[in-house]
Amino acid sequence: MLAFLHDAGFAAAGETPASTVLTGGVSSDIWKVDLRSGTVCVKRALPRLRVAQLWEAPVERNRYEWRWMQAAARIVPGSAPRVLAHDEAGLFAMEYLDGARFPLWKNELRAGRADAAFARQVGERLARIHAATAGDARIAAEFATDAGFHAIRLEPYLLATAHRHHDVAGQLRSLAERTAATRTALVHGDVSPKNILVGPQGPVFLDAECAWYGDPAFDLAFCLNHLLLKCLWVPGAAPRFMQCFDALAGGYISQYSAAGIEARVASLLPGLLLARIDGKSPVEYVTAEAQKARVRSVARALLLAPPATLAEVRAAWQES
């Protein structure tokens, strides 16, 4: 990491800056580095993720995260950290955003601070990135990361879950196949409250390691899924989380309403719900067996009778 900073010209000759390991991620090493010229954040992708089950992924994803951040910042200035330098060994440097000014959305939600206006901004910014890259052959060629997306998203989420739920295995495999075959826009791949900062000028997206030119429905479904699950984490804020669910979906559709996208989001959501309980990356805050049973019940019913609208998913979740 230090050699990279010297080669990139950020660390002066002989400078050995103080560095702090940043926690929270399972897929990368991340450091805050205090250089004489200022503070930067350095990230390196890991070949094996820090989860209980075996989960390996190509380290080349670091290169595509770098590219996604550049593309997003061009389309919606301020929507991603400013990237500074990259090398082919799998390291890149970006600006460090202080948590005092850029709190993590996940932490805000954990405290019960669920701002529907901010959620709408998340949907709008995400949709603008999708809309600006839809049908772009150059971007499609630049993010032809099908194998990586399969390794990081489709296999550990949908396909791994299919091995544990034989009665809906066909539905989960079909969702994976449909997602893999739909290539229409630039996808972030990990749009989650843990990867979104609440910036002074709006949402800032982090951790685009799963960047892929594919189905934008995945991004919207992935984030909406987290808002549903947060209802189990902070039950007292559940009504406000559902308002955020509506606002985020509404903000997205207002900016990008491609044909069939809501139906794909709605039918994918139950697969992701079940995956966050029984896939390779279960959410850490759903631990009670009664809560897990609730998620399984809703998800399996929706997989067997796929919804066409987000309102149907919302109603099934609230009824449970």
Image (cartoon, rainbow, N blue to C red):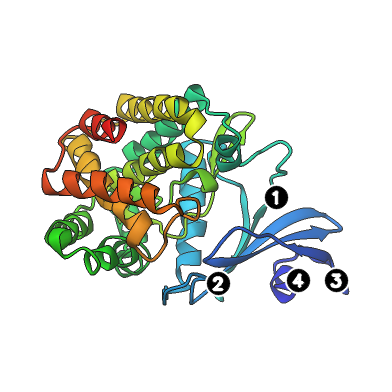
- The answer for how far apart the CA atoms under marks 1 and 4 are is 18 Å
Q: Secondary structure at mark 4?
A: helix
Of the numbered discs 1 and 2, the one sitting upstream in the chain is: 2
Closer mark to the observer between disc 1 and disc 4: 1
- The answer for how far apart the CA atoms under marks 1 and 2 are is 18 Å
Residue 285 position within the rendered picture, expressed as x and y whole percent measured from the top left = 50, 51
Residue annotated with mark 3? 16
| Quadrant where the C terminus is found in the figure | top left
Q: Against 123, is 275 above or below?
A: below
- The answer for how far apart the CA atoms under marks 1 and 3 are is 18 Å
Front-most of 221 and 296?
296
Q: Are marks 1 and 4 in contact (CB under 8 Å)?
A: no
Residue annotated with mark 4? 6
Q: Secondary structure at mark 3?
A: loop
Write the residue at 66% across / 62% down: 42
Front-most of 124 and 71?
124
Residue 7 position within the rendered picture, expressed as x and y whole percent measured from the top left = 71, 72
Write the residue at 15% across / 35% down: 308
Residue annotated with mark 2? 90
Estimate how packed mark 4 is, as few (under 14), some (14 to 19) or many (20 or more) residues with alpha carbons within 10 Å: some
Residue annotated with mark 1? 96
User: Callout 1, which amino acid?
Assistant: Tyr
Of the numbered discs 3 and 2, the one sitting upstream in the chain is: 3
Residue 130 position within the rendered picture, expressed as x and y whole percent measured from the top left = 34, 41
Write the residue at 34% across / 25% down: 250
Q: Against 58, is 192 above or below?
A: above
User: Callout 4, which amino acid?
Assistant: His
